[in-house]
Image (cartoon, rainbow, N blue to C red):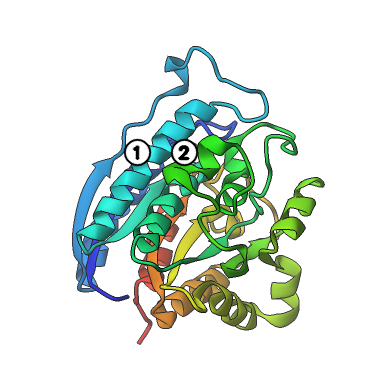
Amino acid sequence: MKNNQVAIIGAPLDLGQGRRGTDMGPSAVRVAGLGTRLAALGYQVSDLGNIAVPQAESVADAGPAGAKFLHEIAASCDRLGGLVVETLQHGRMPLVLGGDHSIAVGTVAGVSRFFRDRGEKIGLLWIDAHADMNTPESSPSGNVHGMPLACCAGAGPEELTRLFGYAPKVDPANIALVGIREIDEEERATIRRTGARAFTMREIDERGMRAVMEDALAIAGGNTAGFHLSFDMDFVDAQFAPGVGTPVRGGATYREAHLAMEMVGDSGRMVSAEVVEVNPVLDQMNRTAELAVELILSAMGKRIL
């Protein structure tokens, strides 16, 4: 990390997916002691609270079937992106707590804009069970949390792809996906078309987490000002992280997830981060939120020795 000032931002959005409850994710992670445990590592921590997001019950019209709640999600991402820019301008690293993964459109837009204004570009390390590369035309559900990476790469509805007036937010050559194991059929074409590099769980099985992360960090961190980390808790196998809305069997083990985050910390190239899809409604005794905090600490420099 380039500085020791961290700003926690809650983005309690759950309009992007079909299973309610991720709006409580930021509170669950805070309850698990994120702020105090970061401070114990030597960080100066400020908590900026939660951005304002609408509740589904307050929305009269869910909008287009191919991208449900598109207007509300775009407005929330615009607010989040503006706060992320302001946070970076004040010399603090934004650490965003979701909410469903659609919030990444706002986080990445804000980080990208800050560095773009300085004549620099960012990379993107996307750690997830899903590729999140659908578009309204390819999505079988119309849930926007399956689209944010495509939007960051410039594919998708303009309300999301062109936040702050430009697209893409990240050069696909600097996007690395790690851990994917569930991809919709038409989504494969978007992955190939953008040129982002995807490391599936099979590749992790065959080569090991260390080798995969070395390659992914080189892609996201090479010739950039640094990378944004977008971490979906469903990357971790459900036996360790039961409180997620879209679990997929065969995920990373507890130690594999920590190794990945320890390598992120070792790289010294992370400029911002978010952890998403913690769903306390589906969790057991806040286990998933507590694991989220542990993984954040590993990415922020906590070591065994």
Q: Picture coordinates of residue 209 (x, y %)?
A: 62, 77
Question: Is disc 2 surrounded by few (<14), some (14 to 19) or many (20+) residues within 10 Å?
Answer: many
Quadrant where the N terminus lies? bottom left
Q: Amino acid at mark 1?
A: Arg
Instruction: Work out whether residue 284 can be spotted.
Output: no
Q: Is residue 199 above or below residue 243?
A: below
Residue at x-position 43% and y-position 65%: 295
Q: Is residue 208 above or below residue 59?
A: below
Residue topped by disc 1:
79
Between circles 1 and 2, the one closer to the viewer is: 1
Mark 1 vs 2, N-terminal side: 2
Callout 2: SS:
helix
Left or right? Give the position of 276 relative to 157: left
Q: Is residue 220 or residue 282 the one in the foreground?
A: 220
Q: Amino acid at mark 2?
A: Thr
Rounded to the nearest whole Å, what is the CA distance between mark 1 and mark 2? 18 Å
How many labels were placed on the picture? 2
Residue at x-position 24% and y-position 59%: 89
Instruction: Work out whether residue 39 can be spotted.
Output: yes
Q: Picture coordinates of residue 161 (x, y %)?
A: 54, 44
Residue at x-position 60% and y-position 31%: 18
Question: Is disc 1 surrounded by few (<14), some (14 to 19) or many (20+) residues within 10 Å?
Answer: some
Q: Disc number at residue 22?
A: 2
Q: Disc number at residue 156?
A: none
Q: Is residue 69 or residue 304 the one in the foreground?
A: 69
Quadrant where the C terminus lies? bottom left
Q: Is residue 48 above or below residue 291?
A: above
Residue lying furthest bottom: 305
Q: Is residue 151 or residue 233 the one in the foreground?
A: 151
